[in-house]
Image (cartoon, rainbow, N blue to C red):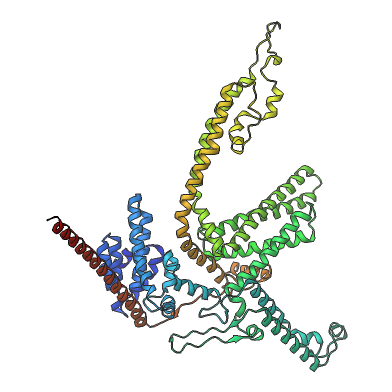
Amino acid sequence: SEWVDALCELLPDHLRPELSWRAQHSRSSPGGFGVVELLLWAVLSYRDRLARALWKEASEPMRAALLASQTYLDLSERERTQKGAAAKLADAERFEQLAVGMLDLLSPHGAAQLLQGCSLTCPTPLLDLAIEGRSKKFVAHEHSQRLIAQRWRGAFVSSHCVLEDGASLSSLLARAVCQLLILLVPAIPQLAGASSPPRARRSQRMRLSMPRGEADSLAAAWTDAVEAWAALLGCTVHSPSFEADEQHYLGPVELSVAEVAALPEGGFWQVPRVKFVVRAAIDISYLLLFAHVLLWCPPDLWCSPAESVFYSWTATNALEEYLQYLSAGSLKEHLRGFWNVVDALKYALLLFAVAAHAIALALWLFPLVPRAMLYATLANGRISLSLGALVACLRSLFAMLAYQQSFGVLFISCFRIMADIKRFMVMLTIVMLAFAIAFSGLLSVENLVVPNSAEPDGTPDEANAIEPRAAQEARGPPWAISFWAIFGESLGHETQSQPRVVAVLLWVYFMLSQCVLINLLTALMSETWERVNEAADDEWKFLYVSNIDEFFGLPPVPPPFNAWLILRHLYLRDRGADPEMLAGRRAESISMAEAELRKRSKMAQRDLVRNEAASEGRTVQAQLSELAMRLRRIERCHARAG
C-alpha cells in the first residue's frame, strides 16, 4: 500500500482515486492488480518499450492505454523543455491511438456496453475516464459521440424517458408547452366546482357551476386536444430500454403526454436537452426584457414595473450561480470553466447596477445629501447595467451557438489564432510607438516662434510662428498620427508648410502598416487556420461534452421559477441541515461483471495486435517484392549491355 501511495503522488489528480480503489480491492480480484501499476511505473520512469510490453499483458488494455496516455499527457505539461514536451505528447497520442484502434473494432452495442460499464475494481466507466483525462480523440470517436448523444436525449440508467433522435428545437419546445398544458387537467374539475365539497358562498362564486360528468368530459376533451397537438407538432418521447444482452434488447415504447406527465422524479423535465431548450427560451426572454429596460425605460429614481421584474430576475439568476459555486466547493474550482468566469463578470456588473440604484434611492431619503452625488450614483449604475448587457448578450448567444458544430468549430479556430493576433499587436505597438515619437518631434517645428526684436522685452510674437496654434490644435496631437494612419487618416498633417521629411515618413508608415504588417497578419492567420482547423473538430466534440455535462447537474426548474427552492436550500444549508439537492440526475454507469469487461477489451486488443502485425508484414513483404523487382531490372540491364 505504501508503494501504491507513493505512485499515486506522481500521477494526475483524476487518476489517484482510480489507483487507490484498485489497491483496496486487489484481494478480491488478484488477477487485475499489478500489471496496470507496473505500466504506470514504466511510464513515469520513461521506459517506453517496457510500457508497451506491459500494455499487452494488461487484463483491460483499453483502460490501461487511456491511463498511460493521460499520464504521458500530464508529464508533457511538467516538462520544461519544448523538445521533451513534444516527445511526451507523441507518446500520449500513441497510447491513445491504441485505445481508439480497439474502439474501432467493436460493434456499436458492444462499445456502448464497454464505455459505460464498470466493475468492482474499475468503478469509473471508460467514457468518464476519457472525459476527465482529456483524451480528446477517444471522446471524439463515433462510438463515444453516439453514447454522449444518447445521454443528451435522456438515455441513461436513472432516466425515465428518452427523446426521439433528430427532434428539432421548435418541436421540443412545443412538446414542453404541451407537457405544461396537461398539468391543468387535474385543476379543471376543481375550477368547475364539481369535485370540491360544499363550502361558503364566497368560495363557490369563484367556481363554475358544472355537474361532475360535464367537468370530467371537459377534462377528457382538454387531454385529447393536448395529445392531438403534441402528435401534430411532432416530438416523440419514448420509454428507456436497457438490456445488457444484445439478443434480448427490447425496442422503446412511445409515451403519451399524460404518461410522460405521470413519470416520477421530474421525468420529462430531467432530460438534459429539455433543460437546455427551456433555459435557452427563458434566457432569450430575459435578454428581451433587458433590451426593453435599456431602450424604453429612461433612467429614473423610481423603478418601473419592467425594471422591478428585471432586477428580481437578475437576483434569482445570481442566487443560482452562487448555489453552483457552493456545489463546486471552492472559488478556484468554480472559475475553472470559461463560461463561469463570464457569468461572474456578468453578475458583478448587474448586481453593482442593482446596488447603485438602491443606494441612490436611499440617498434620496436624506435631504442633506447633495443632488450631484445622487445623480452620479444613478449614472454609475446605468453604465454598469449597459456593460452588463454587453456581457449578457455575448455570453447567452455565443453559448447557444457553440452547441452547433459549425459555429463551435469556428469559435475554437478563432481562439487558437489569438496567439498570432497577440504577436501582431506587439509588433504593431512597437512600430506605432516609434513613429509616434518621431512624428511628435518632427511636427514640433510648427511650434517654433521667433522673438520680436522690436519689442523691448523680447517676448515671442505668435504671429511669427510657422503655423497658428489654433490650426495645430484643430488637427489633434501629433503623436496620434501613428494610430489614425492605420485607418487611412493623417489628421491633416500632410500640408505644404511642414518639412518634407514628415510627408516621406508618413508615406513610409502608410506602406508599413497597411501593406507589410496587415499582409503578415493575414499570412500568419491563414497558416494557423489551416493547421488548427484540422484538429478543431475533435476539440469541439470534447468541449461539447463539457458543455452538456453542465445540464446534468442543473435543477429541472429554471430561474426565476425556482427562487423559493433556492432560498429554502440556502436557508437550510446555513442552519447546518442537509437540504435536498436541487440538481438533476447524473448519467450513471452500468454495473457489469468484471469478466465480461475483460473479455470485450481483450478481444479488441487481440484483433488490434493481429491487424498491426499483418499490416507490418504486408509492408515488409511489399518492400521485399519491390527490391526484387529492382534487382531483376538491374540484371536485365547488365545482360543487354553485355
Quadrant of image for the N terminus: bottom left
Give the percent coordinates (x, y) of residue 195.
78, 90
Q: Quadrant of residue 323?
A: bottom right
In the image, residue 424 above or below residue 175? above
Q: Position of residue 238 (x, y in %)?
A: 58, 83
Left or right: 441 in relation to 364 = left
Q: Residue shown at 34%/70% (left/top)? A: 64
In the image, is 306 to the left or to the right of 419? Answer: right
Query: Which residue is more in the foreground, 580 or 239?
Result: 239
| Place of residue 328 in the rendered image (x, y in percent of width and height, measured from the top left) | 52, 64
Q: Is residue 429 above or below residue 391?
A: above
Front residue of 544 and 554: 544
Q: Residue furthest left?
A: 642
Q: Residue furthest bottom?
A: 213
Residue 372 at x, y = what percent? 77, 42
Whether residue 582 is visible, yes or no, is no
Which picture quadrant has residue 184?
Answer: bottom right
